Image (spheres, grey):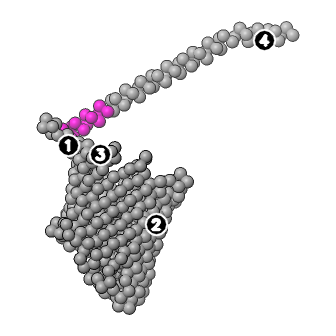
Amino acid sequence: MRAAIVLLATAILAWPVHAESDALLRAEAADLARRAEALEARRSVLLRQDVASYLAEVAPEAGAQGGGGGLQGITLHASLTGVILATVGSDPSDTHSVHGDIALDFDFAVTENLNLFVDLVANSDAAAFPAAFGPIAGTAGATLSGLVDGIGVDGTVSTAPGDVAAYQWGASWTFFVADHAVEVMGGQLDPREYYATNAFASDSRTQFLNNLFDDPPALDWPTNAGGTSIYGLRFFTEFGSKSQYSFDVGWFNTPGQWFNHGLLLMEFAWKGRISDREFHLRAYGQLNTAPDDPAGAFGLSFDWYVTGKIGIFARATVKDNQPGAANHPNQIESDWQLGAVFFGPIPSRPDDQVGVAVGYIKGPVDAIIPGAQNHETVVEIYYTFAMANGKILVTPEAQFVIEPGGSSFANGDDLFLLGLRIHVPF
């Protein structure tokens, strides 16, 4: 009993000491938190000052005295792409093509609302893949998509080896209407950069190589590969509580026919979430006012991150080609594509990716090859090895083309292609 009383008395006497220690610890923790907050605020101020000093050195406000905003900054994006593509098991089996290009994109921020841009490209050859595989096809290209864009990397500007051409150039200006930003862009533009895009199938340099998966071939894409400049004027805006909706409309034509026989493209896009994963749904349309074949087209493009490592996509386009307009350069009436991309398929290589897709193209009966099927199916699979922390992308890939050229293939065989692509962004 006496021992219990002694222990109780000791605990009562020691309680103020413990309480005082806890209070001191809480006070010290609060003081450390305040000091950390002050240091973070000071770090932010110094960082802003460093950034401002750097911008003042590399982009001085030369127009400030005259009332202009002055040059704000210059951004450069560049890449180098090389591809080798060869037939396997088709006659002749040694047909191959090597293609490379380098792209340089300059963006000049003149003011907060005005940007100037110049995109340059240089190809290793003028015709790229379609002409290279012409000898193994009939009177049509190696693939139906070859009539429009080709079966490999081929920009809208074809240059002689070593020549550099302007891929795009122009200006973009942003203004506000009822708290909504509206971007106006004008100049030499490639509409394939802005319409019917897809998160997983829109870039033949880093995603699927066959341009069936790059740009819907049923749309009439203007091209200046023949030396004729294509100019465009487009308007883009986002709206909704979280900018989940957007609308884009543009007019494209050659300078001499700007107000006549042009191409109108438009797109409405919705960005949402399914099972807390982001998706994009785009509805796009085209009106070609060319007098020899006035044609309208409509399509849908969908992409969704099913999980953090899997993305799926689907796209389909239909066009109402006019009967008797066999001379129109684009005879394709419809196309569709389905595919999936897997990110980090090997746990030890989280930056690698695998892509698998199947696509279909249909042309009008007898318009291309009398008595031919005039439809084509393409299957493509690739694996991208991300090396040097993503600074080098090495991609072996395979394409299987069923009824190539709408069954116009010279020996009736299907087409099996193996390729290797190296892309270096810098």
Residue 262, picture quadrant? bottom left
Q: Measure how far apart labels 3 and 2 are at the Cα level.
A: 34 Å
Helix, strand or loop for disc 1: loop
Q: Earlier in the sequence, mark 4 or mark 1?
A: 4
Can you say whether 113 is above or below 105 in the image?
above
Queried whether the magenta region covers residue 56, the answer comes back as yes
Amino acid carrying label 1: it is Leu
Amino acid carrying label 4: it is Leu
Q: Which residue is mark 2?
A: 314
**Residue occupying image coordinates x 15% and y 39%:** 63
**Residue occupying image coordinates x 47% and y 64%:** 313
Magenta stretch: give its range.
48-62
Question: Closer to the camera: disc 3 or disc 1?
Answer: 3
Amino acid carrying label 3: it is Phe
- The numbered disc on residue 299 is none
Give residue 387's position: percent from left, percent from top. 41, 56
Q: Determine whether label 4 and label 3 are within 8 Å by CB.
A: no
Q: Nearer the viewer, residue 286 or 29?
A: 286
Give residue 250's position: percent from left, percent from top. 28, 61
Q: Which residue is mark 1?
A: 71
